[in-house]
Image (spheres, rainbow, N blue to C red):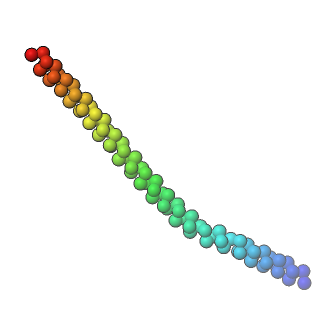
């Protein structure tokens, strides 16, 4: 008799455990999808950072060219004013 009671307690405990674990397992697929989205966005952010670095170098080069052009224009204006 005691064996049947112990067995019933174990079976009920297993049923309760399965009932508690089922919603958690159901949420795991949603968490997996969210993780994949986050990883994809992280890759996109890394690619954008690389593009930003290239653009910053390009802007720095353009700024140097603009400064050189302004110096050249100043030399030309000074040459016209001197004569």
Q: Is residue 83 rendered to the left or right of residue 13?
A: left
Is 48 drawn above or below residue 77 in the view shown?
below
Quadrant in which residue 7 is drawn: bottom right
In the picture as drawn, the residue positioned furthest to the top comes out as 82
Q: Looking at this rendering, what residue extends furthest in the front direction?
A: 81
Residue 58 left/right relative to 38: left
**Position in image of residue 63 (x %, y %):** 28, 34
Q: Is residue 70 above or below residue 81?
A: below
Q: Nearer the viewer, residue 72 or 28?
A: 72
Question: What residue sits 46% from the left and 53% below the top?
Answer: 42
Instruction: Give coordinates of residue 26: x percent, y percent.
Output: 61, 71
- Which image quarter is the N terminus in? bottom right
> Of 29 and 55, which appears nearest the observer?
55
Residue positioned 43% across, 54% down in the render: 43
From the viewer's perspective, tell me whether residue 37 is left or right of residue 78: right
> How many numbered marks have been drawn onto this rendered protein structure?
0
The quarter of the image holding the C terminus is top left
Image quadrant assignment for residue 6: bottom right
What residue is shown at x 54% (from left), y 64% (from top)? Answer: 32
Q: Residue furthest right?
A: 1
Q: Position of residue 74 (x, y in %)?
A: 19, 23
Q: What residue sits 78% from the left and 74% below the top?
A: 13
Locate residue 24, reporting x and y percent: 65, 68
């Amino acid at each position: 008799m005691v064996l049947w009671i112990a067995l019933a307690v174990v079976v009920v405990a297993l049923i309760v455990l399965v009932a508690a674990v089922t919603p958690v397992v159901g949420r795991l697929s949603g968490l997996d999808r969210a993780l994949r989205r986050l990883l994809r966005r992280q890759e996109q952010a890394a690619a954008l950072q690389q593009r930003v670095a290239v653009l910053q170098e390009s802007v720095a080069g353009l700024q140097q060219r603009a400064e050189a052009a302004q110096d050249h224009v100043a030399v030309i204006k000074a040459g016209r004013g001197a004569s």
